[in-house]
Image (spheres, rainbow, N blue to C red):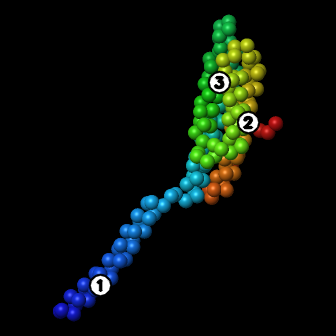
Amino acid sequence: MRAVTILAALALTAGLPALATAQSARETARQTPPPATAAAADLQAYALLLQDAEARLARAREEHAAGRTESQTGAFSQERINLMQTVRSAWQDMQRVPEGFAETVAYQEAQRRMRRDFNQVGPDRSLSKEKADEAARDALQVLAELRGHVVSAAGQAGGSMPAPAVQGGGANR
């Protein structure tokens, strides 16, 4: 019986390092920075955000094209107001860029163009309906091009994401 107790004690002490190793591995896993696929996941989520913004902007542009130019003399139509708000919302979505991608040339250029498009669609009451539509079309293209760069970067970071279909107006000129 005494031999059994000694063997049991040896077995228990032999199991302790294994248990300690398992706990240590779990702690290390918690403290280890996320793998490159976390960056890919962030980029994939950003690409989907841009795709959604692109779809909303395409709808607002269609409504603007079908709507009135003015609701009263000198006042914007509801469609024009909606277009301005949607361009602003798309720009704000675009600014939710994942860390690290904000410094890319593609993002910086997209920011510059989107700022210009927003200013053209925005508060200038002398801007014709056609010019506002042109600015919205360019904003759509900016979103589509940026989304393409983001999908490419996600692939390079270890993610896999098929390029979603262009939602409207994002065709190359």
Q: Nearer the viewer, residue 154 or 31?
A: 31
Residue 110 placement (x, y as % from top left): 70, 37
* Residue 113 visible in the picture: yes
The circle on residue 141 is 2
What type is the residue that disc 2 sits on?
Gln
What type is the residue that disc 3 sits on?
Leu
Q: Which of 172 and 166 is in front in this view?
A: 172
Q: Distance between the residues labelled 2 and 3?
A: 15 Å
Within the image, what quadrant is residue 168 found in? top right
* Residue 164 visible in the picture: no
Q: Which residue corresponds to the image point at 62% horizontal and 58% vertical from the top-left?
A: 158
81 displayed left or right of 142: left
Q: How crowded is mark 1: few (under 14 residues within 10 Å), some or many (20 or more)?
A: few
| The furthest residue to the front | 103
The circle on residue 11 is 1
173 displayed left or right of 136: right
| Circle 2: element type | helix
The circle on residue 83 is 3
Residue 101 placement (x, y as % from top left): 63, 46
Q: Which residue corresponds to the image point at 59% horizontal and 30% vertical from the top-left?
A: 89
Q: Distance between the residues labelled 3 and 1?
A: 73 Å
